[in-house]
Image: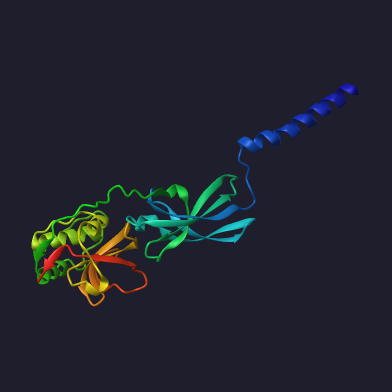
Amino acid sequence: MKILKKISLAVAFAAALVPAFSLGTTAHANATNTIVSTSNMTDTAYTRKSATGWTYNLGGTTTNMTFGKKTHYLKNYPNTTWHATKKRYIVKKNGVKYLYYYVTNGRKTASGWIWHGYLQKKNYAHTSTSTATTGTGTYSDIYKAAKAQLGKPYVYGANGPSSFDCSGFTKYVFNKAIGQTLPRTAQQQYNSYDHVSAKNAKAGDLIFFGTSKNNISHVGIYKGSNTMIDAQLRGVVNEATNVSWWHTVGYSRPATLD
């Protein structure tokens, strides 16, 4: 009888130890997704690390969080700067803890929660502060070369002539029209030429968009009267500049045009 009692006590003691060790090494399945914490963070700029990620609308409660509708597919945002302003730790049903960021693009037209592993911090090492040579020519030549590209598709990194990204388009047009070589990126184009105020901007100037002078995300060729021609996700188009989804940072004058 004493032997059986000792065996029972030993088994009970061993069973009590198992959860203590498992908590530190093994993930346990949960019935729900649980929010561990949500907090604000310093605005941090990211670009996509993987094109397969999605942003989500997160709903539900702290103890039963739900993944709502997928909102934005990173594959469709190849050159977008995402600004993370909140972070959230979640323990999913599989028992694993994940970090999500709440992100918004520069134009504030896309936002949502995304797993941090799909993003990487933006590298500003490519930006230039050199001053490039100002060109000369006519606005008529600039606009003629730009207009000829209307309808051509947007492709990230493309320099033409069959497809363009935003700075590839401006670079191509100025070279085609007046033989001037612009720097490759929108940030470099902003940094390289004299800036002009909005009231002094002329047709043929470059107009820049983003969140600040150090975070230029888009460039177009200004036509005057709050309009421009540019290469964006819909391709090369004529469009307005004074609309809610564009945040104008400034203008530069890469050429003196007649």
- Total numbered labels placed on residues in the image: 0
The image quadrant that residue 145 belongs to is bottom left
In x, y percent, where is residue 106? Answer: 37, 62
User: In the rendering, at what x and y percent does residue 61 appear?
Assistant: 62, 60
Query: Where 51 sits versus 227, above or below?
Result: above
Q: Residue at x 65, y 38 (%)?
A: 23
Which residue occupies the foreground of this view, 181 or 100? 181
Render colour scheme = rainbow
Residue at the extreme top: 3
Q: Is residue 162 visible?
A: no
The residue located at (59%, 57%) in the rendering is 65
Q: x, y percentage for residue 242?
A: 31, 74
Left or right, residue 136 beside residue 212: left
Q: Quadrant of residue 140?
A: bottom left
Residue lying at the far bottom of the rendered structure = 225
Left or right: residue 145 versus residue 15 is left
